[in-house]
Amino acid sequence: MGDEIINKVAESGLVTIDLEKYLPQKESIAVFDLKDFLFMEMILKEKDFREALKQHDWEKYRDKHVAITCSADAIIPVWAYMLVTTYLQPIAKNTIVGTEKEIYRSIFLNNISLIDTSEFNGSRIVLKGCGETPIDDFAYAEATRILLPVAKSIMYGEPCSTVPVFKKK
């Protein structure tokens, strides 16, 4: 009869990239808070600090991304962050001085940077806009930045309803 249903989205040649695939795993992130090593949560006493670091159980940071921070309103000397890093370096995946949110962002951006752009050469790309987990704007901007040199076009949304972002001229 000719009433065959045709899936135009499937035939469109669009390549969908779901940025959820590149999200950091929450269990791979840890925070080292210097506050717990301060006298009265205010003052860093060098001798006590060094001794406390020697006694600390560092194994809980094994193979984790660690944010070194101080949640107390205290003045922390630069060398304290450096010293903590010397203990974390052999066991942690990586460390930054910053918050949990900052290390999450750093890992996410790194994961996106590892996208093999060669497999998208000349492709019409849709960066998926809806999913189980909200994706921050910075991730979409970074994915767009690294895909621009190879993409024929980049769109945002779902294959059935996209917003054009870029089209190679």
Image (spheres, rainbow, N blue to C red):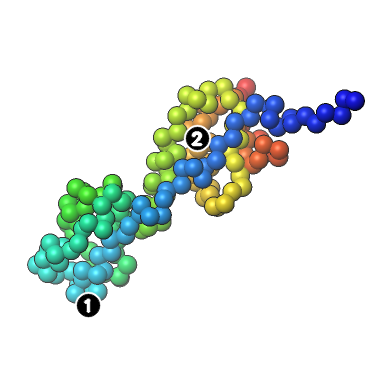
Q: In this view, does 68 lie above or below 135?
A: below
Residue at 83 percent across and 28 percent down: it is 4
Task: Tell me how many marks there are.
Answer: 2
Mark 1 highlights which residue? 40
Disc 1 marks a residue whose amino acid type is Met
- Residue 149 lies, in percent from the top left, at 51, 26
> Which residue is nearer to you in this view: 55 or 123?
55
Residue 17 horizontal/vertical position (percent): 55, 36
- Crowding around mark 2 (Cα neighbors within 10 Å: few <14, some 14 to 19, many 20+) is few
Q: Which residue in the rendered view is the most extreme toward the front?
A: 1
- Looking at the image, is 5 positioned above or below residue 169? below
Q: Earlier in the sequence, mark 2 or mark 1?
A: 1
59 or 124, which is in the foreground? 59
Q: Distance between the residues labelled 2 and 1?
A: 46 Å
Q: Is mark 1 on a helix, strand or loop?
A: loop
Which residue of the protein is positioned furthest toward the left in this rendering? 47
Q: Which label was assigned to residue 145?
A: 2
Q: Which of 70 and 116 is in front in this view?
A: 116
Quadrant for the C terminus in the image:
top right
Q: Quadrant of the N terminus?
A: top right
Identify which residue is drawn at 62% across, 39% down: 156
Q: Residue furthest right?
A: 1
